[in-house]
Image (cartoon, rainbow, N blue to C red):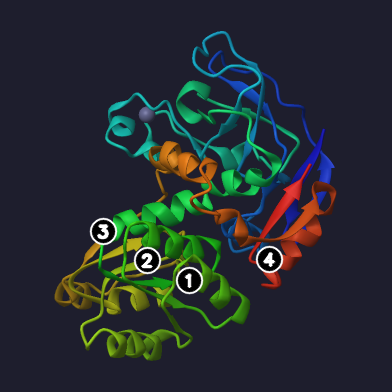
């Protein structure tokens, strides 16, 4: 089969890859009707994370189960399934506590590369959640969004302790930040301040529930959040970028006693201890345990209560994956859906 392979900085190709097969008896093989490009794929694409050998790309997926290993009991061929970017057994003590992204058997799906027509899914019974019926085609983008961007935005809102009636600020207007807005809305936030300077993203943030837009960044952005919150800062702040500037912006925009939920993959962030000490805010984040939220998110999508698939503003055939990366790199697209 052919799929996305990264050869070096800004050199992603639709190239020949090995056909997936059952390796462990706990594996499943799925066929993907759609896959997508993640903001975090841009770190290696831009050469910020080094690429030392041709690397299959992609970690978001939905699909129809084609085949299961001999030890797979719950997942059956023919089911439509969604999984997260970490395969997990969903039975160990860490999984049971709701942190499947740190499962003792966790396998990161970036090593498999799901920007492909078919994929091997490890620990199928723990990793995959089946939809109640075969979904209609128009639901597929939203189901695909639950696999990472929505699950991650949801975890960020959960980690930021979003409560009914609270004020939430969101740092980052990528797909995760925008779906953090949607999550905060679903959790009952009264005021949701999206930080964005791009008109199409501001528009989508408003559709997802943002009540205010702040286009300033850094200290000016923090000052605007303070202005909007009676000088106090937000109760909850979602950080969905992963840089020094965005992390400090998030901490400084949070009121004392408030919460920062950070899900932007951290790159060279150094926290100043003394400032952190006196900020007196809760900091919690990391790779989202999307598996914890999947049953609820799939239910919301299948009942058409939410439409997170709106973050896909460009759809391309998988063989044009290189154009998809360029469009996201140049911020011409929020998120690219690929059709194998
Ligand atoms: Zn586990």
What residue is shown with label 2?
Answer: 238
Q: CA distance from mark 4 to mark 2?
A: 22 Å
Q: Which residue is mark 4?
A: 328
Task: Look at the numbered discs 4 and 1 and tell me whether their residues touch, using CB distance below 8 Å.
Answer: no
Mark 3 Cβ inside 8 Å of ligand 1? no
Tell me the crowding category of disc 1: few under 14, some 14 to 19, or many 20 or more residues within 10 angstroms, Cα based.
many
The residue to which callout 1 is attached is 172
Of residues 322 and 50, the one drawn nearer to the viewer in this rendering: 322
The CA distance from mark 1 to mark 2 is 8 Å
Residue indicated by mark 3: 161
Instruction: Tell me: 315 left or right of 77.
Output: right
**Does label 4 or label 2 sit earlier along the sequence?**
2
Residue at 61%, 59% in the rendered image? 310
Where's residue 101, x and y in %? 41, 40
Compared with 96, 153 (above or below) is below
**How many C-alpha atoms fall within 10 Å of the one at disc 2: few (<14), some, or many (≥20)?**
many
Q: Between disc 1 and disc 2, whose residue precedes?
A: 1
Q: Quadrant of ligand 1?
A: top left
């Amino acid at each position: 089969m052919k799929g996305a392979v990264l050869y070096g900085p800004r050199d992603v190709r639709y190239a020949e890859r090995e056909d997936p097969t059952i390796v462990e008896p706990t594996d499943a093989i799925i066929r993907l009707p759609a896959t997508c490009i993640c903001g975090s794929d841009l770190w290696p694409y831009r050469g910020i994370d080094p690429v030392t050998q041709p690397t299959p790309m992609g970690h978001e997926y939905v699909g129809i189960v084609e085949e299961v290993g001999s030890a797979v009991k719950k997942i059956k061929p023919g089911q439509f399934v969604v999984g997260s970017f970490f395969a997990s057994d969903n039975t160990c003590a860490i999984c049971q506590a709701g942190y499947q992204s740190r499962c003792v058997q966790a396998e990161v799906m970036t090593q498999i590369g799901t920007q492909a027509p078919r994929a091997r899914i490890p620990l199928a019974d723990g990793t995959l959640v089946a939809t109640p019926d075969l979904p209609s085609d128009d639901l597929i983008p939203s189901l695909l969004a639950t696999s990472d961007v929505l699950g991650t935005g949801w975890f960020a809102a959960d980690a930021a302790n979003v409560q009914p009636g609270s004020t939430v600020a969101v740092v980052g207007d990528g797909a995760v930040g925008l779906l953090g807005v949607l999550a905060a809305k679903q959790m009952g936030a009264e005021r949701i301040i999206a930080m964005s300077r791009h008109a199409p993203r501001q528009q989508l943030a408003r559709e997802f529930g943002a009540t205010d837009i702040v286009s300033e960044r850094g200290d000016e952005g923090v000052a605007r959040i303070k202005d909007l919150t009676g000088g106090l800062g937000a109760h909850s702040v979602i950080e969905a970028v992963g840089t020094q500037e965005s992390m400090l912006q998030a901490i400084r925009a949070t009121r004392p006693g408030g919460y920062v939920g950070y899900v932007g993959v951290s790159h060279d962030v150094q926290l100043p201890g003394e400032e952190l000490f006196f900020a007196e805010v809760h900091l919690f984040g990391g790779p989202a345990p999307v598996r914890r939220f999947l049953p609820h998110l799939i239910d919301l999508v299948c009942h058409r209560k939410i439409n997170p698939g709106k973050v896909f503003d460009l759809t391309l055939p998988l063989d044009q994956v290189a154009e998809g990366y360029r469009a996201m790199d140049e911020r011409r697209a929020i998120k690219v859906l690929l059709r194998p």
